[in-house]
Image (cartoon, helix red, strand yellow):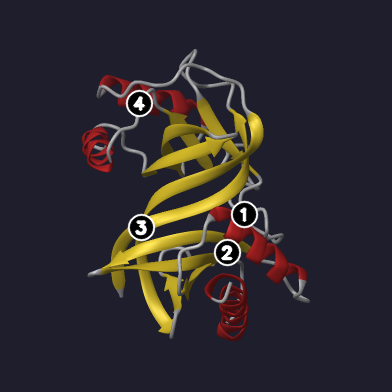
Amino acid sequence: MIETIGYITKEEYLASLELEIIPNTMVIETRKPFPGYHGKDLPGESSSLPEFIFFVTKQKYTTEHIARVTQNIRKYFKDDIDVARAEITIYNTKYPCIRVKNCEDFSKIAELQECYKGEGIKFAKKKKLDSVGLIKIQKHFTIEEITEGIYQDTEEEKTHYLQVPVYLTWAQFKSITYKIKNNMDDSNFDAAQGLFYRRGSIVDVVRIYAADIDTNKLEDIRSRYLKEISRNILNA
């Protein structure tokens, strides 16, 4: 079992949340999370509440600052929520955010905003968004290596990570993923870019989200990424 931290970078459709928020603040929700996967029980599909919400902040706060503020808030905000530092990029504009996952209902959004406001967090002013955006989330990983270069997320059963040998720009990652999925009979999985830290090194990974995916399929997907990286990046 490995516990570490790192990042996930993904592209999703985003829109402004208009109701049940502190007036004149900027809150973003994901629409259709995990766009590459089409299956049952997707996060947020059975609820009117989006699975992932982003409080856009006026300035960029450090991971430590957000963690300490959240720790204080947990003393009086009793709902079990998952909070992380994030950044959203839309048309070259970067929005620092606090990502909130597993909020119970809309009424809790404004309440949680008030908690952060009371702890000194300043929110960006309202701005209407309706666009695809690039999301980078700092994540705590609890993973297990199930075979060489393939990791299972022990907290999210539909999530695996495939180790790759080099860092890819988002454009490279998107191009390679598009090519791989277009040449597979069964391409029903969502892919995102990620990394996690190990002692003295960084492990670059592809995050795969899909239900009931077996090791053979994961090995096949990883093999395709390794071939495309070797052909287009390492030997370019």
Question: How many tags in the picture?
Answer: 4
Label 2 sits on a secondary structure element that is: strand
Whichever of labels 3 and 1 marks the residue nearer the N terminus, that label is 3
Q: CA distance from mark 4 to mark 2?
A: 31 Å
In whole angstroms, how far apart are the C-alphas of marks 1 and 4?
28 Å
| Lateral position of residue 22 relative to residue 14, left or right | left
Task: From the image, tell me which residue sits under label 2.
Answer: 209
Can you identify the residue that label 4 sits on? 59
- Look at mark 1 in the image and give the residue it sits on: 34
| Mark earlier in primary sequence (4, 3) | 3
Q: Earlier in the sequence, mark 2 or mark 1?
A: 1
Location of the C terminus by quadrant is: bottom right
User: Does 69 sit left or right of 129 as displayed?
Assistant: left
Q: Is residue 181 above or below residue 118?
A: below
Is the C-beta separation of discs 2 and 1 under 8 Å? yes
Mark 3 residue type? Gly
Of pointers 4 and 2, the one earlier in the residue sequence: 4
Instruction: Say which quarter of the image contains residue 101.
Output: top left
**Tag shown at residue 6:** 3
Q: Check disc 1: other Cα within 10 Å, few if <14, some if 14-19, many if 20+.
A: many
Please rate how many residues cluster around mark 2, counting C-alpha atoms within 10 Å: few if below 14, some from 14 to 19, many from 20. many
- Tell me whether circle 1 and circle 4 mark residues in contact (CB < 8 Å): no
| Identity of the residue drawn at 52% across and 64% down | 207
Query: In which quadrant of the rendered view does residue 110 lie?
Result: top left
Foreground mark, 3 or 2, reads 3
Mark 3 → mark 2, Cα distance in angstroms: 17 Å
Asked if 184 appears above or below 139 in the picture, the reply is below
In the image as oriented, which residue stretches furthest toward the top?
A: 23
